[in-house]
Image (tube, rainbow, N blue to C red):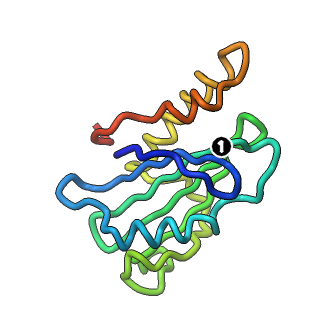
C-alpha cells in the first residue's frame, strides 16, 4: 500500500492510497481510467462531509477496484465503489481500465481495509481529540507505505 498526495474531487479533499504488488505496479492506463471515473463515486457536497480517502487496488488477476470513502456526520464513513476487469463481480469484460459501479454493500477487501483502519484512527487523532478540529493535520497524516496483511 502506497499513500499518494491528496486530491480535490467534488469540492472536498481526498487522501489517496494505491494497493498493488511490488513486482507489478498499477499500470498508467488503469490509474488514468480510475481517476477519470472517480468523480462518479464522490457524493454530492454536504456541510457535514469535509474529506475522505480513496483506494485504488490492482488485483493479482484481471481486476482493478476503486473505493471512495467519505466522512459524513463528522463520525460516519460512506463508501462508494467501482470495479474493472472482473466479470465475477459484474464487469462486462476483463479490461482493468473499464470501471463500472459496484452495487454490493462491500466496504473493501482484506488488502484495502488497512487504509480504513488507519483513517479511522487518524480522523479521531485530528478531528476529535484536539481542542479544535485539524483538517490539515488529518490530510497530512497518511498510512506509511508498506505491505498489508502482515
Label 1 sits on a secondary structure element that is loop
Q: Position of residue 123 (x, y in %)?
A: 60, 30
Question: Residue 14, relative to residue 57: is it above or below?
Answer: above
Point 36% across, 53% down: residue: 19
Instruction: For label 1, count other residues whose C-alpha is less than 10 Å away and answer few (under 14), some (14-19) or many (20+).
Output: many
Quadrant position of residue 75: top right
Q: Quadrant of the C terminus?
A: top left
Q: Which residue is mark 1?
A: 51
Q: Is residue 32 left or right of residue 20?
A: right
Quadrant position of residue 124: top right
Point 58% across, 48% down: residue: 14
Point 31% across, 63% down: residue: 26
Q: Is residue 7 left or right of residue 109?
A: right
Q: Position of residue 64 (x, y in %)?
A: 40, 67
Question: Residue 78, relative to residue 101: is it above or below?
Answer: above
Question: Residue 15, relative to residue 142: is it above or below?
Answer: below
**Which residue is more in the foreground, 12 or 109?**
12
Quadrant position of residue 80: bottom right
Question: Residue 129, relative to residue 10: is it above or below?
Answer: above
Point 57% across, 31% down: residue: 138
Q: Residue furthest top?
A: 131
Q: Is residue 84 left or right of residue 14?
A: left
Amino acid at each position: 500500500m502506497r499513500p499518494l498526495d491528496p486530491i480535490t474531487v467534488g469540492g472536498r479533499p481526498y487522501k489517496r492510497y494505491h494497493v498493488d504488488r511490488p513486482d507489478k505496479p498499477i499500470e498508467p492506463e488503469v490509474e488514468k481510467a480510475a481517476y477519470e471515473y472517480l468523480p462518479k463515486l464522490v457524493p454530492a457536497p454536504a456541510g457535514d462531509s469535509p474529506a475522505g480517502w480513496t483506494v485504488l487496488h490492482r488485483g493479482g488477476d484481471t481486476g482493478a477496484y476503486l473505493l471512495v470513502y467519505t466522512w459524513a456526520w463528522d463520525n460516519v464513513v460512506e463508501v462508494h465503489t467501482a470495479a474493472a476487469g472482473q466479470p465475477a463481480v459484474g464487469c462486462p469484460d476483463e479490461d482493468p481500465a473499464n470501471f463500472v459501479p459496484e452495487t454490493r454493500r462491500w466496504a473493501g477487501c482484506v488488502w484495502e481495509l488497512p487504509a480504513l483502519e488507519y483513517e479511522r484512527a487518524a480522523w479521531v487523532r485530528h478531528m476529535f481529540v484536539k481542542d479544535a478540529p485539524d483538517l490539515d493535520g488529518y490530510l497530512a497524516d497518511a498510512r506509511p507505505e508498506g505491505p498489508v496483511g502482515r
